[in-house]
């Protein structure tokens, strides 16, 4: 298996976990880290070795090879000197388009964090640039890769509950997200672009494409610029109604399950439920079958984000297979554009106070 070397663009909050996820996979090496602040890039690079085996050595307290990724502040210089096989972009959303287009100009496959772009026009432009350059663009949309959500999809596809006609997807949390990521407070568009991108993608993953949507938002925190509560009702092309409820209101909940997503699906022959602690219950005329689907635990994961960090590895694995020509990636730029259309359609619906036709 050919070893693929990549460059990580970004040295902020999510970058260490993104890099740790790559170290779990064989045949891939981080050759360089690039950050706008060179000192931050150097600090991140010197925390991580260039191979998965070295990573295991460090976690076990053994000495690895001593080789670490190079650090850069200039992405052009990195590309020129390192010549990576692909680039993984883990930076603020406003930098996504210029960095993706830089990779495309150099003919380098590129992975971009969600949300793909700050506007639909930017996303369309990014896709056009990559298509003209013959460069694949992948979006690191990891939420659908959570163990329990994948298992729920398998239950749904087996057809035991018949045809789904209504569902509710809930991600409502009192977790203080603004402590770890204070920049969220300054976003004019917050919850739908951050969490909504994940949850609306899950709706597509489970039920296909939407036909219409209607959205209402609220702002509970008074010291932020954007919305921290949103409700989106979707009418899917298969006729199902799906309600997506999201909140980072930081209000008091009896039990905090951050960052678990709860899902309830009604079908013509039964129901499916993904509940707390990763339990899935399938109920039909024959009774209820229950099984727990916990995520894999990684030593490097932040306990508060363990579930999400586990799904990073699964998303990486799917994209890496596509980069090797061994399969199709689920979360391509083309696919994620349809999720972004829902996100920005939700903002249009809130602004206009009406149901929006989804392109």
Image (spheres, rainbow, N blue to C red):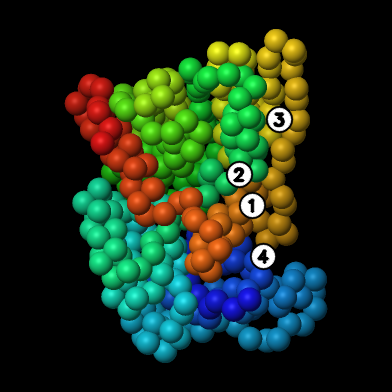
Which residue is farthest top?
A: 285
Identify the mark nearer the N-term, 4 or 3: 4
Disc 1 packing (10 Å; few <14; some 14–19; many ≥20): many
Dot 3 corresponds to which residue?
A: 279
Question: In the depicted view, which residue is nearer to us: 56 or 101?
Answer: 101
Disc 3 packing (10 Å; few <14; some 14–19; many ≥20): some
Dot 1 corresponds to which residue?
A: 310
Q: Identify the residue at image location x=50%, y=44%.
A: 177
Side (left or right) of 27 relative to 124: right
Question: In the depicted view, which residue is nearer to us: 317 or 345?
Answer: 317
Identify the mark nearer the N-term, 4 or 1: 4
Could you say where residue 108 lies in the image, as x and y percent from the top left?
A: 39, 74
Q: Quadrant of residue 76?
A: bottom left
Dot 2 corresponds to which residue?
A: 146
Mark 2 → mark 3, Cα distance in angstroms? 13 Å
Answer whether residue 296 is visible to the viewer in this image: yes
Question: In the depicted view, which residue is nearer to us: 144 or 309?
Answer: 144
Provide the secondary structure element on which disc 1 rests.
helix
Q: Is residue 356 above or below residue 195?
A: above
Provide the secondary structure element on which disc 4 rests.
loop
Mark 4 → mark 1, Cα distance in angstroms? 10 Å
Mark 2 → mark 4, Cα distance in angstroms? 16 Å
Give yes or no for contact between labels 1 and 2 (Cβ–Cβ under 8 Å): yes
Q: Identify the residue at image location x=48%, y=50%.
A: 330
């Amino acid at each position: 298996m050919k070893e693929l070397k990549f460059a990580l663009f970004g040295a902020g909050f999510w970058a260490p976990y993104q890099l740790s996820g790559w170290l779990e996979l064989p045949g891939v090496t981080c050759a360089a880290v690039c950050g706008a602040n060179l000192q931050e890039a150097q600090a991140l690079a010197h925390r991580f070795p260039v191979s998965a085996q070295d990573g295991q050595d460090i976690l076990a307290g053994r000495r690895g090879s001593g080789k670490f990724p190079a650090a850069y502040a200039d992405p052009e210089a990195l590309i020129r000197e390192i010549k990576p096989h692909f680039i993984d972009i883990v930076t603020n959303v406003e930098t996504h388009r210029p960095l993706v287009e830089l990779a495309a100009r150099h003919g380098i496959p590129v992975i971009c964090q969600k949300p793909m772009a700050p506007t639909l026009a930017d996303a369309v432009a990014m896709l056009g640039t990559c298509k003209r350059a013959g460069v694949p663009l992948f979006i690191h949309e990891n939420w659908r890769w959570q163990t329990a959500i994948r298992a729920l999809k398998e239950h749904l596809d087996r057809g035991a509950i018949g045809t789904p006609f209504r569902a509710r997807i809930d991600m409502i949390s009192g977790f203080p997200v603004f402590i770890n990521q204070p920049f969220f407070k300054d976003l004019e568009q917050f919850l739908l672009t951050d969490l909504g991108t994940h949850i609306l993608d899950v709706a597509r993953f489970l039920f296909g494409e939407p036909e219409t949507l209607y959205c209402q938002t609220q702002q509970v925190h008074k010291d932020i610029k954007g919305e921290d509560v949103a409700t989106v009702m979707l009418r899917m092309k298969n006729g199902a109604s799906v309600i997506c409820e999201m909140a980072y209101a930081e209000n008091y909940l009896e039990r905090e399950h951050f960052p678990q997503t709860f899902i309830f699906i009604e079908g013509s022959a039964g129901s499916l439920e993904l509940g707390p602690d990763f339990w899935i219950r399938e109920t039909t005329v024959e009774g209820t079958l229950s099984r727990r689907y916990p995520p894999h635990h990684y030593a490097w994961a932040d306990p508060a984000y363990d579930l999400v960090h586990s799904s990073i590895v699964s998303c990486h694995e799917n994209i890496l297979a596509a980069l090797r020509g061994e399969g199709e990636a689920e979360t391509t730029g083309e696919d994620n554009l349809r999720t972004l259309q829902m996100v920005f359609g939700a903002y249009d619906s809130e602004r206009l106070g009406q149901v929006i036709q989804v392109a």
